[in-house]
Image (tube, rainbow, N blue to C red):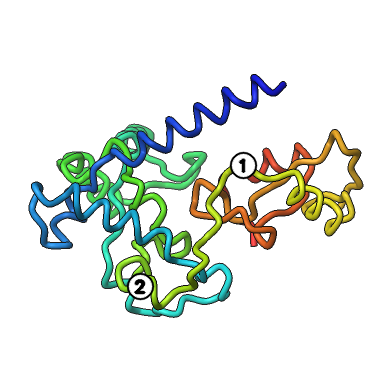
């Protein structure tokens, strides 16, 4: 069991290191007004800023930057998602219908728009992978890159920094289980010790911390059903 655990942790660390090497998207570099030669240093600076943010909007329950968010760039569309969208548009035009189940009529106005989108060169601004900064700093509500990561400084944030460790100590797990009375916080089912899963309310992959306030007990079914969604 310990060997298996060590292998998993090793794979996770390799993945995190590789993520750090992914360059910033062209559109973010252009928005920042820096040259390609400066990209590595700028990326290091932005990645350092990820450590400073301690009170994100999911704790405040509102966006403190309001309309300012719209002045900041969106992360690039992933190349795979763009190609899937093109296939969807093509299928809509073939069937003359649209929607998830292709059960809505495709009117003339949308047909023209779909044809224009299908023929447009939209891959130029896409990225095969997101950089660490663009992945972590993307607002889950508005989609834009959060202004906090650009304007914050260490002295404006807590000196503690976010607890971004993926590994949870036995003591932390025990406190969370006791706090939640060994019950799934999604469906309410009382769980045996072997059935307990510790879930990040804000997923780790989306910037969630490993602080106890972001952890809860769930059953296997509810945890898998949630996936990478944010469940406040």
| Of pointers 2 and 1, the one earlier in the residue sequence | 2
Q: Residue at x 47, y 64 (%)?
A: 141
Q: Which mark is residue 152?
A: 2
Quarter holding the C terminus is bottom right
Residue in front for this viewpoint, 189 or 204: 204
Judge the density around disc 2: few (<14), some (14-19), many (≥20) Cα neighbours within 10 Å.
Answer: some
On the rendered structure, is 123 left or right of 209? left
Q: Residue at x 16, y 54 (%)?
A: 29
Where in the figure is residue 144, as x and y percent of width and height?
A: 35, 62
Where in the figure is residue 14, as x and y percent of width and height?
A: 43, 30
Residue 86 visible in rendering: no
Q: What secondary structure is marked by label 1?
A: loop
Judge the density around disc 1: few (<14), some (14-19), many (≥20) Cα neighbours within 10 Å.
Answer: few
Q: Which mark is residue 200?
A: none
Residue in front for this viewpoint, 87 or 58: 58
Residue in front for this viewpoint, 120 or 69: 69
Where in the figure is residue 142, as x and y percent of width and height?
A: 41, 65
Above/below status of 155 relative to 53: below
Above/below status of 173 relative to 74: above
Which residue in the protein does label 1 denote? 167
């Amino acid at each position: 069991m310990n060997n298996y655990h060590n292998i998993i942790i090793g794979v996770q660390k390799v993945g995190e290191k590789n993520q750090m090497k992914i360059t910033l998207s062209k559109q973010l570099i252009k928005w920042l007004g820096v040259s390609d030669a400066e990209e590595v240093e700028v990326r290091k600076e932005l990645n350092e800023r990820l450590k400073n943010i301690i009170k994100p909007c999911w704790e405040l329950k509102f966006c403190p930057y309001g309309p300012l968010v719209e002045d900041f760039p969106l992360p690039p569309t992933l190349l795979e998602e763009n190609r899937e969208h093109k296939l969807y548009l093509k299928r809509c035009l073939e069937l003359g219908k649209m929607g998830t189940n292709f059960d809505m009529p495709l009117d003339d106005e949308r047909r023209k728009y779909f044809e224009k989108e299908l023929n447009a060169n939209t891959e130029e601004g896409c990225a095969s992978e997101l950089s660490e900064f663009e992945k972590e700093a993307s607002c889950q509500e508005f989609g834009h890159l959060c202004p906090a990561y650009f304007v914050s400084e260490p002295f404006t944030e807590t000196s503690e920094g976010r607890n971004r460790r993926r590994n949870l100590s036995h003591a932390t797990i025990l406190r969370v289980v006791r706090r939640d009375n060994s019950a799934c916080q999604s469906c309410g089912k009382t769980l045996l010790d072997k059935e307990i899963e510790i879930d990040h309310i804000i997923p780790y992959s989306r910037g969630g911390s490993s602080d106890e306030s972001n952890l809860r007990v769930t059953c296997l079914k509810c945890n898998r059903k949630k996936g990478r969604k944010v469940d406040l």
